[in-house]
Image (cartoon, rainbow, N blue to C red):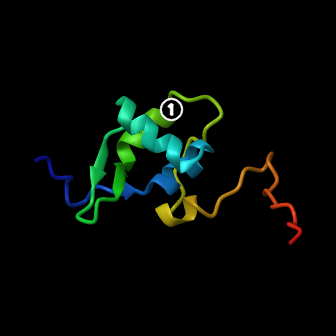
Amino acid sequence: MLRPRDHEVLLTPAEVAALFRVDPKTVTRWAKAGKLTAIRTLGGHRRYRQSEVQALLKTVPGAMQTTPATPSQASNMTSPTMPAQVSPAREF
């Protein structure tokens, strides 16, 4: 079994999705299709190598070209061209 290097930064599906401006499920599909390599944690969660994500980012037009200072900041970023989505009110 391959182990990631100790100093290698790993990103969650949500963090990768924020960089590409896609849904986290899309990132999972990319891993199944072989576009990204998913590393499984002991709990079964997927993680992605930051270096591999950066390489893929360079090939995608319109994606962010830099990673936030810390991976957790990726999930807090919003697109300047797309307003935050607001759920419509439900009638009960």
Q: In the rendered image of this protein, does residue 37 appear above or below residue 10? A: above
Q: Residue at x 86, y 72 (%)?
A: 92
* Res. 70 visible in picture: no
Q: Quadrant of residue 8?
A: bottom left
Most extreme residue toward the left, as rendered? 1
Q: Quadrant of residue 55?
A: top left
Q: In the rendered image of this protein, does residue 88 appear above or below residue 80? A: below
Q: In the rendered image of this protein, does residue 72 appear above or below residue 54? A: below
Binning the other alpha carbons within 10 Å of mark 1 as few (below 14), some (14 to 19) or many (20 upward) gives few
Q: Residue at x 38, y 30 (%)?
A: 33
Label 1 secondary element: loop
Q: Residue at x 56, y 64 (%)?
A: 73
In the image: residue 57, left or right of residue 52 = right
Q: Quadrant of residue 30?
A: top left
Image location (x, y in percent) of residue 72: 51, 66
| Residue under numbered circle 1 | 58
Q: Nearer the viewer, residue 50 or 46?
A: 46
Q: Residue at x 86, y 61 (%)?
A: 88
In the image: residue 70, left or right of residue 64 = left
